[in-house]
Image (cartoon, grey):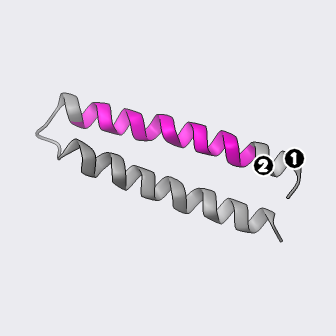
Amino acid sequence: MSTLALLVVLLLFLVGALVVAALFYAAYRRPVLTAPLTVALTGAAVLVAMVTTVASAAGR
């Protein structure tokens, strides 16, 4: 995998981590939305799926 592909995966991970944190914070501030941990874990699962897809595509 090239350095550029690794950098893109790292940046995608960092942005995704910020999104997961924002989801967790929003659910924590408004508990009526849903359980904060469930929202954060769902966002993390989506992030892992995206990073895996990008990494496998870059490895070809």
Q: In this view, does 28 lie to the left or right of 53?
A: left
The residue positioned 40% from the left and 50% from the top of the image is 43
Taking 49 as reference, is 33 above or below it? above
Q: Say whether residue 18 is magenta.
A: yes
- Report the amino acid beneath label 2: Leu
Residue at image mark 2: 6
19 or 48, nearer to the observer:
48
Mark 1: few, some, or many residues within 10 Å (few <14, many ≥20)? few
Taking 1 as reference, is 39 above or below it? above
Q: In which quarter of the image is the C terminus?
A: bottom right
Taking 31 as reference, is 43 above or below it? below
List the single residue furthest toward the top: 29
Percent across and percent down for residue 34 are 17, 46
Residue at image mark 1: 3
41 or 57, nearer to the observer:
41
- Report the amino acid beneath label 1: Thr
Q: In which quarter of the image is the N terminus?
A: bottom right
Q: Is the magenta stretch mostly helix, strand or loop?
A: helix
The residue positioned 71% from the left and 61% from the top of the image is 55
List the single residue furthest toward the left: 32
Residues at badges 1 and 2 in contact (C-beta under 8 Å)? yes
Mark 2: few, some, or many residues within 10 Å (few <14, many ≥20)? some
Q: Is mark 2 on a helix, strand or loop?
A: helix
The residue positioned 20% from the left and 28% from the top of the image is 29
Magenta span of residues? 8-27
List the single residue furthest toward the bottom: 60
Q: Which mark is residue 43?
A: none
Report how far apart the C-alphas of labels 1 and 2 lie in the structure. Answer: 5 Å
